[in-house]
Structures are given as C-alpha cells and as structure tokens.
C-alpha cells in the first residue's frame, strides 16, 4: 500500500471518529439555551482564564528543562516554551499528533541537541503525564469518604472513572516497564534497531541506526530514583496547574466546585484530548460534556456551552502564540509541520 493511500485511510478514520464524537456531543442541544448560558460570564475571571491558558506550556517547559539538565544545564527555558507552544499549535491544527515530534525537533535545532534523544524524552513525558493524572484521580477516589457528605456524583460517573483510571494506570505501567527494559538492555535494543534498518537503502540506514541509538539514550533518565521522584513531583505541578485553569474557568460561569473536585473532570478531558483528532475536536468535547453533566450535575445545554468556550479559548490563544513564534523565527506553519515528518538535526 502506498504512503499516499495510507495517509488517506488515516484521515478518513480520524474524520469518522471526529464526526461520531461530535454527533454525541451535539445530540439534543437547544442552541438558544446554550447561547444564553455562554453570555453569562464574569469578564474579570474570563480575562484571568485567558491569561492562564499558557500556564501548562510554562510548567511543561520547566519540567523538560529539569529532565535535560544532565545533557545541557544551560538550556534556555524560552526555547523550551517556544517548542512546546509550536508542538501544541500543530496538534490543534493538523491530525496525527505531529506536534509530539515537532516539539523535540524544534528544541533540538535551537539548542543544538540530538533530535532522537529529545524524542525519547517525550516518551518519558507522556508516561509521567499518565502516572500523575492516575495518581491524582486515585487520591480523589480514595478520599471520597471525606467529601462524600457534601458532594455526590452519579454512580455511573464513578464507574467510568474507575475504568479509565485502571486503563491509564495499566498503560503507564506497561510504558514504564518497556522504557526501563529498553534502556537496561540497550545493547540488544541497538542490535534490534540495526536489524530492522537493513531493508532501508544504505544512504539512510546509518541515519535510522543513529536515530534509534539516540532515542535509547534519551531514556537514560530512568537510571536515577531521586530524579524520577523529582520529575514525578513536577508532573503533579503541571496537572494541578491545568486543574487550576479549569477551576477558574468554571468560576467565571458561577460553577462553584472545590478545586480538588476538578481532578476527575480534567482526567476525563485528558482522555478525550488523547484521541488524535485535529484540534481535539470530538473527543475532548464529548468527554467534557460527560464530565460536566455526570460529575457536577450541570444541565446539558450549559455543559455544551462551557465546553465550546473552554475549547475555543485554548485553541485560539495557543495558536495565536504559536503564530507569533512562527513569525519571530521566520518560518511558516507548513515548515513547522514538516519538522514532525523528520528528525534530522
């Protein structure tokens, strides 16, 4: 099958998934009621919400700098913020999660580091994102007796949370074990990469082997338990910051819930955002609606309205910042996207 045909099939599948989730999201919506809810917003808290959109880009960049300090202690935090912003901009506009490769390749070029090595650190990041959210969700579920007297969720909502929490924990554990295994047996892993590269032409085989070895080296972070614990704590900071953003947004619409209770909602939106649709369309929206109605008991039209607004401001603010960075670096959006299709330094 040609690469063009594979891309077409991938786009069709992604498009179908997006349409299905959007159909469930918009199902039975009264647009007059939804618009009425959208207009009832505290302008000062909304302004604060807009300012908080880039917060996770900053905290992720601080965490990334910590991860890379043994490789380049003088890494500029601004370059990491630029890389993260461009990565999320590409993810919001194009399908296929190309931004996950754009981020490390862009930073590698800025800081003159190995692209393969930095791509290995992205695997570390995503693994710890899952661990951090599962930890926070577990803390929420375990402490239910403490808040159960003043906050009740639908039984089916807790069932879904337990299910997705278990799935996330299993996935993160398997990724963690695989990463440790690859790095522990990096000699054999390098041999496997060499074997898999044999079908490639000679002129690019060495690049495949080199990239594979750099990727394996990027996993060496796992050799130190103190660094693991420190990185996990920074991952908690990243996700608590994301919870804070949603908490302020909900307050802007007078949805008053304790900060701690935003954790399961953020977990559900994270599940939806992980579906590789352009702009998180469909998956994020559906899971957000489910979370707002089942966890906080919001009316469906209000839940749809809030989801549309919070989705839009994240996309618009991030992409606006991304375009500023693209302009400042004298690039085009499509040039940035091409970074995700290659890993040359």
Image: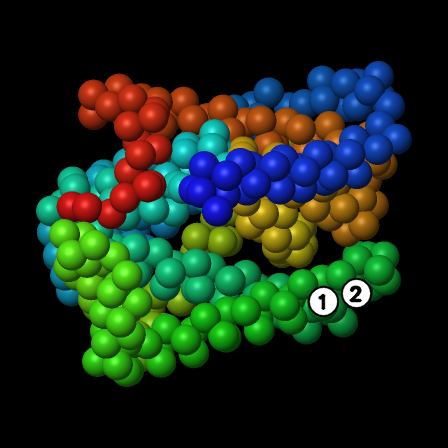
Quick one: 27 or 258, which is closer to the camera? 27
Residue appearing at x 47%, y 30% in the figure: 93
Residue at x 81% of width, y 50% of height = 294
Q: Which image quadrant is residue 71 in?
A: bottom left
Residue 147 at x, y percent in the picture: 74, 63
Residue 311 position in % (x across, y down): 59, 32
The 10 Å Cα crowd at callout 2, few under 14, some 14 to 19, many 20 or more, is: few
Looking at the image, which is closer to me, 211 or 179? 211
Q: Residue at x 54, y 69 (%)?
A: 171
Q: How far apart are marks 1 and 2 (CA)?
A: 6 Å
Residue 159 - label: 2
Q: Mark 1 points at which residue?
A: 163
- Residue at horizontal 32%, vertical 76%? 182
| CB-based contact (under 8 Å), mark 1 and mark 2 | yes
* Side of 249 relative to 118 (left or right): right
Direction from residue 317 to residue 102 in the image, left or right? left
């Amino acid at each position: 099958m040609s690469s063009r045909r594979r891309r077409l099939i991938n786009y069709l599948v992604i498009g179908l998934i997006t349409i299905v989730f959007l159909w469930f999201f918009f199902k039975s919506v009264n647009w007059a009621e939804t618009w009425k809810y959208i207009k009832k917003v505290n302008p000062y808290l909304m302004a604060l919400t807009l300012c908080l959109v880039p917060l996770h880009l900053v905290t992720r960049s601080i965490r990334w700098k910590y991860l890379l300090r043994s490789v380049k202690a003088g890494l500029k935090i601004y370059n990491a913020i630029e890389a993260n912003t461009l990565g999320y901009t590409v993810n919001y506009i194009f399908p296929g999660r190309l931004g996950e490769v754009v981020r490390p390749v862009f930073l590698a070029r800025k800081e003159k580091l190995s692209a393969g090595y930095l791509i290995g650190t992205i695997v570390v990041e995503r693994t710890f994102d899952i661990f951090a959210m599962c930890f926070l969700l577990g803390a929420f579920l375990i402490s239910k007796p403490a808040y159960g007297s003043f906050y009740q969720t639908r039984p089916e909502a807790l069932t879904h949370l337990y299910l997705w929490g278990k799935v996330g924990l299993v996935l993160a554990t398997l990724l963690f074990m695989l990463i440790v295994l690859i790095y522990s047996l990096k000699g054999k892993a390098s041999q496997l990469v060499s074997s898999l590269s044999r079908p490639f032409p000679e002129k690019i085989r060495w690049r495949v082997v080199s990239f594979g070895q750099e990727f394996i080296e990027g996993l060496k972070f796992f050799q130190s338990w103190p660094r693991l614990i420190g990185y996990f704590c920074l991952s908690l900071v990243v996700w608590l910051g994301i919870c804070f953003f949603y908490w302020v947004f909900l307050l802007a619409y007078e949805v008053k819930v304790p900060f701690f209770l935003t954790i399961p909602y953020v977990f559900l939106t994270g599940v939806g955002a992980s579906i590789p649709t352009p702009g998180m369309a469909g998956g994020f929206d559906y899971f957000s609606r489910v979370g707002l109605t089942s966890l906080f008991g919001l009316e469906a039209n209000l839940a749809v309205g809030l989801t549309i607004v919070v989705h839009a401001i994240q996309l618009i603010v991030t992409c606006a910042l991304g375009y500023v960075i693209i302009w400042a670096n004298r690039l085009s959006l499509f040039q940035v996207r091409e970074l995700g299709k290659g890993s040359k330094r």
